[in-house]
Amino acid sequence: MSQEPSSESDAATTAGDAPALPVLRLKHHEERRIAAGHLWIFSNEVDTTATPLSGFAPGALVAVRSYRDRFLGYAYVNPHALIAARILTRDAGLVPGPSLIVHRLRVALALRERLYAEPYYRLVHGESDALPGLVVDRYDDLLVAQIATAGMEAQKEAIVAALDKVVRPRVVVFKNDSGARELENLPKYIEAVRGELPATVTVREDGLAFTAPLADGQKTGWFYDQSANRRQFLPLVRGLGRVLDVFSYAGGWAVPAARGGAAVTCIDSSAAALEAARANAAANGTTVTTLRSDAFDALEAMHAARERFDAVIVDPPAFIKRRKDQGKGEAAYKRLNQLALQLLPRDGLLISCSCSYHLEPAALLDAIQKGARHLGRFVQVLASGGQGPDHPVHPAIPETRYLKAFLCRATHE
Ligand code: SAH
């Protein structure tokens, strides 16, 4: 086991040597969620008479205090965002700064080194690693970071210095192009702050090598969150004849399925994704067929052509990004799962995933079941999964648990 991380107080800049931070005061009774472990303070919970939000610059550090003046933690603020502040530490002796980030990174790295034999994983998963608004994915000596908040943007130099110190990477890229940045009034950009900006990232997963586009790719390049599900589900796909991977991206599901002997077809709307899927198949000594199309159109056309696949994998982008998309999004999951089930033979497998936090696991199962009933099919859930342990869940913050995946068998009634 790797070295145990130091305690928070070891890493502390003691409050005694540091200038006192300005206070952000909460309204009466609004400290309860924070006291229960949550890290977010919504703008309507702030006592704006005592501490007007307009008095803080985006990203400013504050000491959060209750209505009765109880110290709740140090946080960063964004006066323009609905989530007005996020707690960085509850230790009054630990004023946030470079040494806190170094400490948090060491704790995060200790977990991943314990879990993984090779340096390919999510190193920092935001709130769940007590670094709210920061994601870092590791591709050996290449790190791809994503900052979602003004508070973390203000810590960018300290983050880079901490990564240098704790991980000593060759390349550090900020892929700061996510939609979440708009909520914080942050510009979008992609930038290498150490080394040159590479066109691709290379991953090793379960003995296979994958290369995925970086600037033109999804997220940080790879979906580490699905690794554990692929490992759990793919053995059941081994030995099957035909497999369809819908929303295939760079072939994370398709390539190991093809290696297992299946004839695999990948569907994706992105030419770059499909090019990567073909190249990844070749690099691992196999082949996949690709079809560039909207997934819904392709599934309908395949149904009309009476095509059949022994297993269909559906791993779509989030259809419900915000609460207001709920109705439309749920309908899309239902339609998609029904279209996928329709392509299965008398006895086939469906791997169905959703990364929408707003879709409960039971709601995804309901989408599958409704589709199955509509088609007169009988579904059995054989296994279920979520994000891997490098994407830990913060028990007080339900938003940190977002991925669900089901392996189902569909037969006839
Ligand atoms: N299954 C992949 C991750 C999928 S990411 C993995 O495990 O790595 C979602 C993919 O869906 C992206 O590659 C994106 O290009 C594609 N996509 C998004 N909307 C689509 C649509 N309407 N039809 C087909 N592909 C789509």
Image (spheres, grey):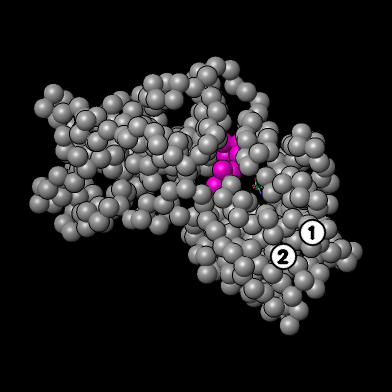
- Mark 1: which amino acid? Leu
Name the residue at 61% across, 70% down: 381
**Residue 9 vs residue 392: left or right?**
left
Q: Does the magenta stretch mainly form a helix, a strand or a loop? A: loop
Name the residue at 38% across, 46% down: 128
Q: What is the spatial separation of the Cα atoms under label 2 and label 1, in whole angstroms?
A: 10 Å
> Any mark on residue 240, and which?
1
**Residue 407 vs residue 404: left or right?**
right
Lower position in the chain sequence, tag 2 or tag 1: 1
Tell me where residue 104 sits by quadrant.
top left
Q: x%, y% of residue 262?
A: 81, 53
Question: What residue would you read off at disc 2?
Answer: 349
Please say whether residue 218 is one of the residues in the magenta stretch.
Answer: yes
Name the residue at 22% across, 43% down: 90
**Residue 360 vs residue 59: left or right?**
right
Q: Quarter holding the C terminus?
A: bottom right
Q: Which residues are magenta?
A: 215-225
Q: x%, y% of residue 304?
A: 87, 66
Marks 1 and 2: in contact by CB < 8 Å?
yes
> Any mark on residue 387, and which?
none
Q: Is mark 2 within 8 Å of ligand 1?
A: no
Circle 1 Cα neighbour tier, 10 Å, few/some/many (<14 / 14–19 / ≥20): some
- Mark 2: which amino acid? Leu
